Image (spheres, helix red, strand yellow):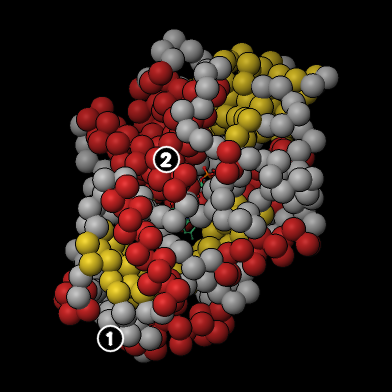
Amino acid sequence: MKKLYKKADVVIIGGGVFGCAIAYYYTRNNPGKKIIILDRNELCNSATSHAAALVTKIRAKRHFIPLSLETYKVVSEMEKILGESMDMKFSGVLHLAASEAREADLKELMEIAKEFNQPANYISADEAHKLSPWLKTDEASLIGYMPEEAYCDPYLLGTFFSRCAKMQGAEFLQGVEATELIIENNDILGVKTTIGDIIANKTIIASGAWAPLFARQAGIGLPMAPTRSQYWITEKNPIFPANSPIVLLPDAQAYARPEGGSLLFGIREKNSMSVAADIIPSDINQFSFSEDKGMQDLSEVIDRLARFFPKVYDIGMKYYVAGFSGYTPDNNLSMGVAPGINNLLLATGCVGAGISVSGGVGLAFAELAAGHSNPYDFSEFDIKRFGDIDPFSPEWLERCARARSTKVSG
Ligand SMILES: Cc1cc2nc3c(=O)[nH]c(=O)nc-3n(C[C@H](O)[C@H](O)[C@H](O)COP(=O)(O)OP(=O)(O)OC[C@H]3O[C@@H](n4cnc5c(N)ncnc54)[C@H](O)[C@@H]3O)c2cc1C
């Protein structure tokens, strides 16, 4: 049996953006309390460092919005603490609608922006083309522009959280693996790790794609499936000015943003890939996401994208990036207080939006871990909303994969 490593008020399994954000808020709001965050690799090595990192504020799912607004707020707060800029790119976002259904969605989105006091206005096809010269706008019937949306460097965001948390007293253990929850009767007492047991009043699972494995130990069928997200970065070209906006193309189920003179773009594949958490290696770089760098997937949907980005047929692709996010059948987050067992919290099921919502998620779990009430409404994210499910079954994986391939919003 391993000896006790340490006692803490809170232990977090996983040092991605969620784990680091929770650590930041917990140490900010509870000075003197002890929190330990462990990651078996380096911090932010997995989904976090692979994200396209659109920090979307305005979306159709209203209950995500306060969480993302908090992310914007905390970035400036941390910039002050560290005396450094995170160099967030306030590029704005263009939403193009090229069908009646998407026009209706865009009109609703513009109303939502107003509701949340976010600037948003319609612009002409010519204006949009001037902002993003690669964009063919003649099929767009309506274009919305939200100038205060941004993207960021996701690794920097994660490490801003961890650096500030460390300054405030958090203990980060890298290269330390959580092997098993310590359970007594109906209570979680902490976690066994490769360097000894960590006993804590509250244990938080923030282990991203691997979260269903720990949830299973606690008797919970966590409703999410690790699902591949992938994007491509083109070669440089003057049609991709570095200061041009993010572009959302719901009719093509695609998004794009500048990446230092190149274009980064993603598109929903016809067949998304969801896998059971127990087949993913601990080092995500050892997982083969696509042998042909997503070219087959891209070729199946490229015509959809070419309506708005005709150059996609002949521009060179310089990089291919893929990783896992926790998807759910309703594209809602899957997180909160663990049902049916004490002292366990699940900061999981990010549905490809974890960078955007990290501020609110961090604050919510820091409050819950301190025994306070959640400042946000998490009812839509309830872990029991699908009933009893087996997150490792082929049927469940298929439901989650379908949710990704049919998703139209960014
Ligand atoms: C290609 C791609 C594009 C994306 N684009 C966007 C975007 O534009 N906007 C957006 O908001 N989001 C985006 N996302 C989603 C975003 O990256 C995730 O939602 C977010 O990073 C989730 O953070 P996390 O902390 O939950 O998970 P992770 O970053 O995966 O962190 C989990 C951590 O747990 C650790 N861990 C696992 N098991 C153990 C164990 N047993 N012991 C110790 N440590 C363990 C892992 O090493 C890892 O570091 C994208 C994701 C991908 C893959």
Give the structural element (helix, strand or loop) at label 1. Answer: loop
What kind of residue is marked 2? Leu
Q: Is residue 268 visible?
A: yes
From the top left corner, tell me how far across and down residue 239 is, in percent.
22, 78
Please indicate whether residue 12 sits to the left or right of residue 143 in the image.
right
Give the quarter of the image for residue 54: bottom left
Measured along the vertical axis of the image, is residue 39 above or below residue 373?
below
Check the picture and name the quadrant holding the C terminus: bottom left
What kind of residue is marked 1? Asp
- For the point 41% across and 28% down, the residue is 24
For marks 1 and 2, the one nearer the N-term is 2
- For the point 27% across and 86% down, the residue is 138
In this view of the protein, which residue sits in the foreground, 350 or 109?
A: 109
Give the structural element (helix, strand or loop) at label 2. Answer: helix
Q: Circle 2 is placed at which residue position?
A: 67
Please indicate whether residue 223 sits to the left or right of residue 233 in the image.
right
Q: Circle 1 is placed at which residue position?
A: 138
Q: Is disc 1 in contact with disc 2, using a CB cutoff of under 8 Å?
A: no
Please indicate whether residue 359 sits to the left or right of residue 177 in the image.
left
Check the picture and name the quadrant holding the N terminus: top right
